[in-house]
Image (spheres, helix red, strand yellow):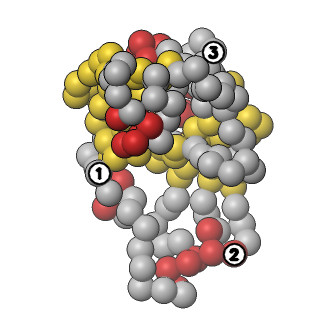
Amino acid sequence: MHHVAYTVPDLDQAVEFFVDVLGAELAYRMGPVEFPDSDWMERYLGVHRDATMDLAMLRLGPVTNCELFAYSAPDQRREIPRNSDWGGHHLAFYVEDMDKAVEYLRARPGVRILGEPQPLDPGSTRGDSWVYFLSPWGMQLELIHMPPGMAYERETATRLYQPGGH
Protein backbone atom coordinates (compact mmCIF):
# COMPACT_ATOMS: atom_id res chain seq x y z
CA MET A 1 0.00 0.00 0.00
CA HIS A 2 1.30 3.46 -0.82
CA HIS A 3 -1.20 5.74 0.93
CA VAL A 4 -4.68 6.35 2.27
CA ALA A 5 -6.54 9.52 1.28
CA TYR A 6 -9.28 11.62 2.84
CA THR A 7 -11.17 14.70 1.71
CA VAL A 8 -11.36 17.40 4.38
CA PRO A 9 -13.26 20.69 4.52
CA ASP A 10 -10.22 22.90 5.25
CA LEU A 11 -6.77 21.72 4.14
CA ASP A 12 -4.82 24.17 6.32
CA GLN A 13 -6.74 23.06 9.43
CA ALA A 14 -6.34 19.37 8.59
CA VAL A 15 -2.60 19.62 7.87
CA GLU A 16 -2.09 21.54 11.11
CA PHE A 17 -4.05 18.90 13.07
CA PHE A 18 -2.27 15.94 11.48
CA VAL A 19 1.17 17.53 11.99
CA ASP A 20 0.78 19.24 15.38
CA VAL A 21 -1.58 16.78 17.12
CA LEU A 22 -1.01 13.42 15.40
CA GLY A 23 2.71 13.79 14.65
CA ALA A 24 2.61 13.59 10.84
CA GLU A 25 5.30 15.13 8.66
CA LEU A 26 4.28 17.26 5.68
CA ALA A 27 5.97 15.99 2.51
CA TYR A 28 4.40 18.40 0.01
CA ARG A 29 1.35 20.46 -0.97
CA MET A 30 -0.13 21.06 -4.43
CA GLY A 31 -2.87 23.17 -5.83
CA PRO A 32 -5.09 24.49 -6.84
CA VAL A 33 -5.53 21.68 -9.36
CA GLU A 34 -8.17 22.58 -11.93
CA PHE A 35 -8.98 22.07 -15.60
CA PRO A 36 -11.55 24.77 -16.42
CA ASP A 37 -12.08 23.96 -20.11
CA SER A 38 -11.85 20.19 -19.90
CA ASP A 39 -13.61 17.13 -18.52
CA TRP A 40 -10.35 15.92 -16.95
CA MET A 41 -11.62 16.05 -13.34
CA GLU A 42 -14.72 14.06 -14.27
CA ARG A 43 -12.91 11.60 -16.52
CA TYR A 44 -9.93 10.84 -14.27
CA LEU A 45 -11.22 11.48 -10.73
CA GLY A 46 -14.97 10.91 -11.04
CA VAL A 47 -15.86 14.34 -9.67
CA HIS A 48 -17.73 17.29 -11.21
CA ARG A 49 -15.92 18.65 -14.26
CA ASP A 50 -15.70 22.10 -12.61
CA ALA A 51 -14.18 20.76 -9.38
CA THR A 52 -10.95 22.21 -8.08
CA MET A 53 -8.74 20.78 -5.38
CA ASP A 54 -5.71 21.32 -3.25
CA LEU A 55 -3.83 18.44 -1.68
CA ALA A 56 -1.17 17.64 0.88
CA MET A 57 0.84 14.43 1.27
CA LEU A 58 1.86 13.51 4.79
CA ARG A 59 3.99 10.82 6.36
CA LEU A 60 2.50 9.10 9.41
CA GLY A 61 5.09 7.00 11.19
CA PRO A 62 7.38 4.51 9.48
CA VAL A 63 5.00 2.89 6.97
CA THR A 64 1.95 5.06 6.27
CA ASN A 65 1.47 7.92 3.85
CA CYS A 66 -1.74 9.96 4.07
CA GLU A 67 -3.03 12.27 1.35
CA LEU A 68 -5.48 15.02 2.28
CA PHE A 69 -7.68 16.73 -0.30
CA ALA A 70 -9.78 19.88 -0.09
CA TYR A 71 -12.21 20.05 -3.01
CA SER A 72 -14.55 22.72 -4.24
CA ALA A 73 -17.24 21.37 -6.55
CA PRO A 74 -20.74 22.52 -7.56
CA ASP A 75 -22.30 19.19 -6.53
CA GLN A 76 -20.20 18.54 -3.41
CA ARG A 77 -21.85 16.72 -0.49
CA ARG A 78 -20.59 17.97 2.85
CA GLU A 79 -21.76 15.26 5.23
CA ILE A 80 -19.07 13.07 6.77
CA PRO A 81 -20.13 9.43 6.42
CA ARG A 82 -20.66 7.45 9.60
CA ASN A 83 -18.90 4.10 9.91
CA SER A 84 -22.22 2.43 9.07
CA ASP A 85 -22.67 4.43 5.82
CA TRP A 86 -21.40 3.14 2.49
CA GLY A 87 -17.96 4.61 2.13
CA GLY A 88 -17.71 5.04 5.90
CA HIS A 89 -14.16 5.01 7.16
CA HIS A 90 -11.77 5.76 9.95
CA LEU A 91 -8.01 5.88 10.36
CA ALA A 92 -6.49 4.04 13.34
CA PHE A 93 -3.35 5.03 15.23
CA TYR A 94 -1.40 2.46 17.25
CA VAL A 95 -0.48 3.60 20.78
CA GLU A 96 1.64 1.93 23.45
CA ASP A 97 -0.19 3.61 26.36
CA MET A 98 -3.92 4.06 25.79
CA ASP A 99 -4.56 6.12 28.93
CA LYS A 100 -1.74 8.54 28.14
CA ALA A 101 -2.87 8.91 24.51
CA VAL A 102 -6.50 9.59 25.52
CA GLU A 103 -5.36 12.15 28.10
CA TYR A 104 -3.24 13.85 25.40
CA LEU A 105 -6.17 14.04 22.95
CA ARG A 106 -8.63 15.28 25.61
CA ALA A 107 -6.35 18.31 26.07
CA ARG A 108 -6.48 19.22 22.36
CA PRO A 109 -9.04 21.87 21.33
CA GLY A 110 -11.90 20.55 19.21
CA VAL A 111 -11.06 16.85 19.67
CA ARG A 112 -13.93 14.72 20.98
CA ILE A 113 -13.36 11.27 22.48
CA LEU A 114 -16.29 8.90 21.84
CA GLY A 115 -16.83 7.07 25.11
CA GLU A 116 -13.97 5.40 26.91
CA PRO A 117 -11.28 2.94 25.77
CA GLN A 118 -12.82 -0.47 25.19
CA PRO A 119 -10.78 -3.53 26.19
CA LEU A 120 -11.82 -6.65 24.29
CA ASP A 121 -11.97 -9.97 26.13
CA PRO A 122 -13.74 -12.49 23.89
CA GLY A 123 -12.74 -13.81 20.50
CA SER A 124 -9.85 -13.26 18.14
CA THR A 125 -8.99 -9.78 19.39
CA ARG A 126 -8.76 -10.55 23.12
CA GLY A 127 -6.32 -8.06 24.66
CA ASP A 128 -7.04 -5.34 22.09
CA SER A 129 -8.03 -1.93 23.45
CA TRP A 130 -9.49 0.85 21.31
CA VAL A 131 -11.39 4.14 21.38
CA TYR A 132 -12.76 6.35 18.60
CA PHE A 133 -12.30 10.11 18.52
CA LEU A 134 -13.34 12.95 16.23
CA SER A 135 -11.07 15.58 14.72
CA PRO A 136 -12.15 19.23 15.05
CA TRP A 137 -14.03 18.95 11.70
CA GLY A 138 -15.69 15.62 12.59
CA MET A 139 -13.42 13.06 10.89
CA GLN A 140 -13.59 9.75 12.72
CA LEU A 141 -10.26 8.39 13.95
CA GLU A 142 -9.26 5.59 16.33
CA LEU A 143 -6.60 4.81 18.90
CA ILE A 144 -5.73 1.12 19.18
CA HIS A 145 -3.39 -1.00 21.28
CA MET A 146 -2.90 -4.66 20.36
CA PRO A 147 -0.38 -6.48 22.54
CA PRO A 148 1.77 -9.32 21.21
CA GLY A 149 0.25 -12.78 21.31
CA MET A 150 -3.27 -11.90 20.20
CA ALA A 151 -5.77 -14.77 20.26
CA TYR A 152 -6.22 -14.73 16.45
CA GLU A 153 -2.56 -15.77 16.07
CA ARG A 154 -3.45 -19.30 17.25
CA GLU A 155 -5.82 -19.66 14.28
CA THR A 156 -3.68 -18.43 11.36
CA ALA A 157 -0.11 -17.82 10.29
CA THR A 158 -1.10 -14.31 9.09
CA ARG A 159 0.11 -11.57 11.38
CA LEU A 160 -1.08 -7.98 11.42
CA TYR A 161 1.58 -5.30 11.20
CA GLN A 162 2.34 -3.82 14.60
CA PRO A 163 4.68 -0.89 15.25
CA GLY A 164 7.65 -1.90 17.35
CA GLY A 165 7.96 -5.31 15.73
CA HIS A 166 5.04 -6.98 17.54
For residue 77, above or below residue 42 = above
Q: Position of residue 114 (x, y in %)?
A: 73, 35
Question: Which numbered disc flags the more N-terminal residue, 1 or 3?
Answer: 1
The tag earlier along the polypeptide, 3 or 2, is 3
Q: Is residue 81 left or right of residue 163?
A: right
Disc marking residue 110: 3
Please give the residue where the numbered disc 1 appears in the rendered image: 2
Numbered circle sitting on residue 123: 2
Residue at the (52%, 46%) spot, across then down: 92
Q: CA distance from mark 1 to mark 2?
A: 31 Å
**In percent of the image, x 60 and y 26: which residue is there?**
76
| Front: mark 3 or 2 | 3
Mark 1 or 2, nearer chain start: 1
Amino acid residing under circle 2: Gly
- 3 vs 106, nearest the viewer: 3
- The three-letter code of the residue at mark 1 reads His
